Amino acid sequence: MAIAPWHCLDAVLDGNNTNNLTPFEKKHGCKLWEAFSKQPRMGKMFYDAMAAETMALIPAVIKVWQATFQRTGSLVDVGGAMGIGASSIAAEFPHAKCSVLDRPDVVAVAQLAGCPNVGFPPRRHVHVHTPC
């Protein structure tokens, strides 16, 4: 499921992609998130991989952006899923009100799992996590 779309990359980038399809959509006929709803096991693998990546990278993010986080009163982790990044930043900088912004289905799962501060809050500072 993950490798096959790369074989469609040339067809998507050749200038004739009038439907603006991603390689994944071209190969599988649906968006990535739709595929995860049809194949929850694949979705879980994806979210587990993103969580592992965040846990590996967040210490460096905190170190590099320490001065910024010390001055930040509120922060939204966009695409933050279960809130690993926001929770880590909040633990280091308790004065910062950290929240997570993600798709409604992800927010629902996070809230059911008891993750606080996950939702759609109005904030000004944004940490954008773009692993894909």
Image (cartoon, rainbow, N blue to C red):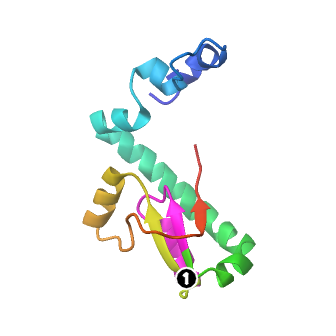
Q: Which residue lies under the disc numbered 1?
A: 96
Quadrant that contains the N terminus: top left
> Which region of the structure is painted magenta?
75-92
Among all residues in the image, which is located at the extreme bottom? 95
Q: Amino acid at mark 1?
A: Ala
110 versus 99 height, above or below: above
Most foreground residue, 102 or 122: 122
Neighbor class of circle 1 (other Cα within 10 Å; few <14, some 14-19, many 20+) is some
Which x, y percent locates residue 95? 55, 88
**Residue 71 covered by magenta stretch:** no
10 versus 119 height, above or below: above
- 13 vs 4, left or right, is right
74 versus 5 height, above or below: below
Which x, y percent locates residue 56? 60, 61
Q: Provide the secondary structure element on which disc 1 rests.
A: loop
2 versus 119 height, above or below: above
